[in-house]
Amino acid sequence: MTDSDLGAPRVVSPQENETALRRAQEVVGLYGDPDVTWGISLELSFAEPVDLTGAPARLTTMVREHPHLGPVPSLRQVPAQEWDRVREESASADFGDGRLVRLLARSDARTFFVTAHHGVCDGLGLVAIASSLVGRELSSSARGVGERRSSRSFLTSSIVRLGEALVSPPARFGGTRNPARVAEPESLLQESATRWKVNGTTVCTALTKVYAAWPRGRSRGGRRFLVVMGASRRAPGDIAPDRRTAYLRIPLKLGWDEARVKAAIRAVEPEPDFPETSAGGVGPMVMRALKNRLGYTVNVSNLGLVTGDGLESLAMFPAVNGPQAVGIGLVSTPLRTTVSVRTRRSDFSEDEARLLLRRLVEEMG
């Protein structure tokens, strides 16, 4: 296995790396679990090998225009037989060295893997980074929330969330806990189909059905089935490697049909924007103390329909945080739709993670 820097990126000092990392951490400082890496990832496959000759210049220009991304990322080339292992390691590793974007290319130059700290970009930002890497315009149909704002202040919303955590923590999928595997990379699974017509409503409805049928002895937490769904404040067609993110906290009930789930998603307002600060470390302390009662049942990320020259498929892997965390990704191309599941190996066995994906696919038809 070799690492290719695709040229000679500017040497970045340890102080610059530390500053870039600190800024990324501040973005999630008042609501983010400090014990997780906050890496989000995107896997892309193309019909033919991609010519990467101009990649160094494109990546350098991208970072020059968006310095919050940290140092110019290098591209690691990975043999096909090691791809699954290396991509999971890349998605799960922390960002302690200050390099906030990681890029992998399979040896056939048809499949790529992009990982970034969620503090520097959102899912559409990953698409933008991938576009700079491969030198092809990629666009998404995903519609954001625009300038819609919460009617609550951040402080009020935080008090409500803390009260909910203490009184009624969210329901969680249960699995075979194995603390001995806590240091292992997270599990990244996906399945694609050519005839799916699914969206966030379809996935959320299916998830409630999967949870209802999940072995009762393995379920944990409270009774609230809570979905966290990422959203964007970008203008239509605007894809840049930035973090212009909003998010929705959607309480659902088991047994609801798609119409009621759709109505619930439409009715919820975005969570208030949070200050980009850790409040002198108080925020992470509170999150760490209550992390077993905070969080969600499922984190869903839907990038809509993504198009680009020669693009065959994508898979999105959102960040997971909190106990028994489950991340669900949904992305379509003109050729196929891919649904993905991300879990920790310390929370779910391999069989349980695959069962979760299989049942989700079955419920989506």
Image (cartoon, rainbow, N blue to C red):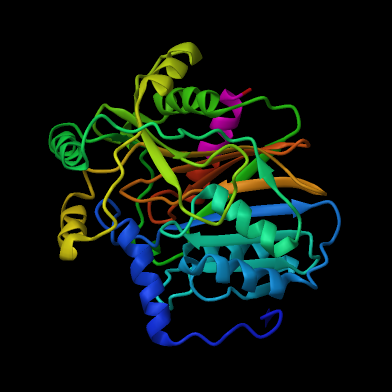
The answer to which image quadrant residue 289 occupies is bottom left
x, y (%) of residue 201? 51, 24
In this rendering, the count of numbered labels is 0
**Image quadrant containing the N terminus:** bottom right
Is residue 359 rendered magenta in the image? yes
x, y (%) of residue 342? 49, 48
Q: Is residue 86 above or below residue 258?
A: below
The answer to which image quadrant residue 15 occupies is bottom left
Q: Residue at x 55, y 55 (%)?
A: 41
The reply to whether residue 180 is in sight is no
Would you say the magenta stretch is mainly helix, strand or loop? helix
Left or right of residue 115, residue 76 in this image:
right
Q: Is residue 11 above or below residue 348?
A: below
Left or right of residue 24, residue 4 in this image:
right
Q: Which residues are magenta?
A: 355-364
Q: Is residue 190 above or below residue 92?
A: above
Q: Residue at x 35, y 36 (%)?
A: 297
The reply to whether residue 236 is in sight is yes
Q: Residue at x 43, y 75 (%)?
A: 98
**Image quadrant containing the C terminus:** top right
Q: Is residue 339 above or below residue 127?
A: above
x, y (%) of residue 230? 44, 40
> Closer to the camera, 83 or 145?
145
Q: Residue at x 73, y 59 (%)?
A: 111
x, y (%) of residue 291? 23, 50
Is residue 244 rendered magenta in the image? no
